[in-house]
Image: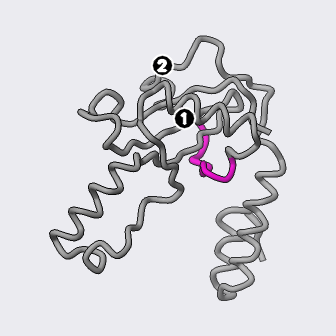
Amino acid sequence: MFEKRRHIHIGAEGWADNVEDAQVDVVVTFPDSTKWISNFYTIKCIESIRKDYLQNGHCLNGAYWCGSSPVVIVDNISRERIEQVVDELIENAGFQYVFEYFGAVREEDISRSEYPENFFDEESKIDSSYVSYYASQLVQMLEQSSEKVRQTIMKDIFRVSQ
Protein backbone atom coordinates (compact mmCIF):
# COMPACT_ATOMS: atom_id res chain seq x y z
CA MET A 1 0.00 0.00 0.00
CA PHE A 2 0.98 3.64 0.11
CA GLU A 3 3.34 4.68 2.80
CA LYS A 4 3.16 7.84 4.87
CA ARG A 5 6.45 9.18 3.53
CA ARG A 6 5.48 11.23 0.50
CA HIS A 7 6.40 14.36 -1.43
CA ILE A 8 3.63 16.69 -2.59
CA HIS A 9 4.00 19.01 -5.57
CA ILE A 10 1.18 21.52 -5.99
CA GLY A 11 0.92 22.97 -9.48
CA ALA A 12 0.81 26.77 -9.50
CA GLU A 13 1.31 26.81 -5.74
CA GLY A 14 1.17 30.36 -4.44
CA TRP A 15 -0.33 31.74 -7.65
CA ALA A 16 -3.94 31.64 -6.53
CA ASP A 17 -5.24 34.97 -5.30
CA ASN A 18 -7.97 33.23 -3.33
CA VAL A 19 -7.28 29.74 -1.93
CA GLU A 20 -11.05 29.28 -1.50
CA ASP A 21 -11.82 29.89 -5.21
CA ALA A 22 -9.20 28.03 -7.24
CA GLN A 23 -8.05 24.76 -8.79
CA VAL A 24 -4.63 23.08 -8.69
CA ASP A 25 -3.04 19.86 -9.87
CA VAL A 26 -1.48 17.83 -7.08
CA VAL A 27 1.28 15.28 -7.72
CA VAL A 28 2.24 12.95 -4.89
CA THR A 29 5.51 11.04 -5.17
CA PHE A 30 6.45 8.06 -3.03
CA PRO A 31 9.88 6.55 -2.24
CA ASP A 32 9.21 3.77 -4.78
CA SER A 33 9.59 6.51 -7.46
CA THR A 34 5.91 6.43 -8.45
CA LYS A 35 3.97 9.63 -9.09
CA TRP A 36 0.22 10.00 -8.64
CA ILE A 37 -1.95 12.94 -9.75
CA SER A 38 -5.30 14.44 -8.88
CA ASN A 39 -7.04 17.76 -9.51
CA PHE A 40 -8.16 19.73 -6.47
CA TYR A 41 -11.06 22.15 -6.94
CA THR A 42 -12.65 24.30 -4.31
CA ILE A 43 -16.41 24.40 -4.00
CA LYS A 44 -16.36 28.12 -4.82
CA CYS A 45 -14.27 27.45 -7.93
CA ILE A 46 -16.88 25.05 -9.24
CA GLU A 47 -19.57 27.63 -8.49
CA SER A 48 -17.51 30.25 -10.38
CA ILE A 49 -17.12 27.93 -13.36
CA ARG A 50 -20.87 27.29 -13.38
CA LYS A 51 -21.66 31.02 -13.29
CA ASP A 52 -19.28 31.56 -16.20
CA TYR A 53 -20.96 28.73 -18.12
CA LEU A 54 -24.38 30.26 -17.43
CA GLN A 55 -23.25 33.64 -18.75
CA ASN A 56 -21.43 32.28 -21.79
CA GLY A 57 -23.72 29.40 -22.74
CA HIS A 58 -21.19 26.63 -22.21
CA CYS A 59 -22.15 23.10 -21.19
CA LEU A 60 -25.89 23.57 -21.72
CA ASN A 61 -25.77 26.92 -19.93
CA GLY A 62 -24.11 25.52 -16.82
CA ALA A 63 -26.25 22.38 -16.61
CA TYR A 64 -23.13 20.26 -16.23
CA TRP A 65 -19.42 20.53 -15.63
CA CYS A 66 -16.69 18.09 -16.60
CA GLY A 67 -13.58 18.37 -14.51
CA SER A 68 -10.32 16.66 -15.25
CA SER A 69 -10.37 13.20 -13.74
CA PRO A 70 -9.70 12.40 -10.96
CA VAL A 71 -11.10 15.26 -8.87
CA VAL A 72 -10.99 16.09 -5.18
CA ILE A 73 -13.29 18.86 -3.97
CA VAL A 74 -11.98 20.80 -0.98
CA ASP A 75 -12.84 23.92 0.99
CA ASN A 76 -9.48 25.54 0.14
CA ILE A 77 -6.29 24.74 -1.76
CA SER A 78 -3.74 25.77 0.84
CA ARG A 79 -0.72 23.49 1.22
CA GLU A 80 -1.83 22.68 4.74
CA ARG A 81 -5.29 21.51 3.59
CA ILE A 82 -3.89 19.51 0.66
CA GLU A 83 -1.38 17.74 2.92
CA GLN A 84 -4.16 16.95 5.41
CA VAL A 85 -6.33 15.47 2.65
CA VAL A 86 -3.49 13.41 1.14
CA ASP A 87 -2.42 12.09 4.54
CA GLU A 88 -5.98 11.12 5.49
CA LEU A 89 -6.51 9.39 2.15
CA ILE A 90 -3.29 7.40 2.63
CA GLU A 91 -4.19 6.52 6.22
CA ASN A 92 -7.74 5.46 5.37
CA ALA A 93 -6.83 3.53 2.18
CA GLY A 94 -8.72 5.93 -0.08
CA PHE A 95 -5.73 7.36 -1.93
CA GLN A 96 -5.92 5.01 -4.93
CA TYR A 97 -9.54 6.01 -5.57
CA VAL A 98 -8.87 9.73 -6.03
CA PHE A 99 -5.32 9.74 -7.39
CA GLU A 100 -4.28 8.28 -10.73
CA TYR A 101 -0.92 6.70 -11.51
CA PHE A 102 1.16 9.36 -13.28
CA GLY A 103 4.31 7.42 -14.10
CA ALA A 104 7.73 6.95 -12.67
CA VAL A 105 10.02 9.73 -11.54
CA ARG A 106 12.42 10.67 -14.32
CA GLU A 107 15.78 12.37 -14.07
CA GLU A 108 14.34 15.76 -15.12
CA ASP A 109 11.69 15.43 -12.38
CA ILE A 110 14.43 15.13 -9.79
CA SER A 111 16.16 18.28 -10.97
CA ARG A 112 12.87 20.27 -11.06
CA SER A 113 11.39 19.12 -7.77
CA GLU A 114 12.81 19.62 -4.35
CA TYR A 115 12.79 16.06 -3.10
CA PRO A 116 14.31 15.59 0.34
CA GLU A 117 17.76 14.06 0.43
CA ASN A 118 17.65 10.24 0.41
CA PHE A 119 13.90 10.31 -0.29
CA PHE A 120 13.91 7.52 -2.87
CA ASP A 121 14.29 3.90 -1.86
CA GLU A 122 15.82 1.87 -4.70
CA GLU A 123 14.63 -1.36 -3.07
CA SER A 124 11.01 -0.20 -2.93
CA LYS A 125 8.77 -1.19 -5.85
CA ILE A 126 5.20 -0.33 -6.81
CA ASP A 127 2.61 -2.43 -5.02
CA SER A 128 1.81 -5.48 -7.13
CA SER A 129 -1.94 -5.09 -6.55
CA TYR A 130 -1.92 -1.84 -8.55
CA VAL A 131 0.07 -3.40 -11.36
CA SER A 132 -2.45 -6.26 -11.43
CA TYR A 133 -5.37 -3.84 -11.46
CA TYR A 134 -4.05 -1.84 -14.41
CA ALA A 135 -2.97 -4.99 -16.23
CA SER A 136 -6.47 -6.43 -15.91
CA GLN A 137 -7.90 -3.22 -17.36
CA LEU A 138 -5.51 -3.52 -20.28
CA VAL A 139 -6.51 -7.14 -20.83
CA GLN A 140 -10.19 -6.17 -20.89
CA MET A 141 -9.49 -3.42 -23.42
CA LEU A 142 -7.43 -5.75 -25.58
CA GLU A 143 -10.28 -8.26 -25.61
CA GLN A 144 -12.45 -5.53 -27.16
CA SER A 145 -9.85 -4.42 -29.72
CA SER A 146 -8.91 -5.69 -33.15
CA GLU A 147 -6.39 -8.44 -33.73
CA LYS A 148 -4.05 -5.85 -35.26
CA VAL A 149 -4.14 -3.73 -32.09
CA ARG A 150 -3.51 -6.79 -29.90
CA GLN A 151 -0.52 -7.83 -32.01
CA THR A 152 0.89 -4.31 -31.95
CA ILE A 153 0.56 -4.11 -28.16
CA MET A 154 2.11 -7.52 -27.66
CA LYS A 155 5.01 -6.56 -29.91
CA ASP A 156 5.58 -2.98 -28.76
CA ILE A 157 4.84 -3.18 -25.08
CA PHE A 158 5.48 -6.77 -24.14
CA ARG A 159 8.13 -7.42 -26.81
CA VAL A 160 6.42 -10.66 -27.82
CA SER A 161 6.77 -11.63 -31.47
CA GLN A 162 4.06 -13.75 -33.05
Tell me the residue at 78%/60% (across/down).
Answer: 133
Residue that badge 1 annotates: 106
Quadrant (top left, top right, bottom left, bottom right) of the N terminus: top right
Q: Nearer the viewer, residue 48 or 140?
A: 48
Q: In this view, does 120 lie to the left or right of 82?
A: right
For the C terminus, which image quadrant? bottom right
Q: Residue at coordinates 74% horizontally, 34% vertically from top-left? A: 91
User: Is residue 101 positioned above or below 18 on the image?
Assistant: below
In depth, the one of 65 and 30 nearer the eye is 65
Q: Please name the amino acid that badge 1 sits on.
A: Arg
Instruction: Work out whether 88 lies above or below 110.
Output: below
State the count of labels: 2
Label 2 neighbour load within 10 Å: few <14, some 14-19, many 20+: few
| Image quarter of residue 116 | top right
Is disc 1 placed on a helix, strand or loop? loop
Provide the residue designation for mark 2: 114
Membership of 64 in magenta stretch: no
Residue sitting farthest toward the top: 117
User: Residue 74: percent from the left, percent from the top?
Assistant: 48, 43
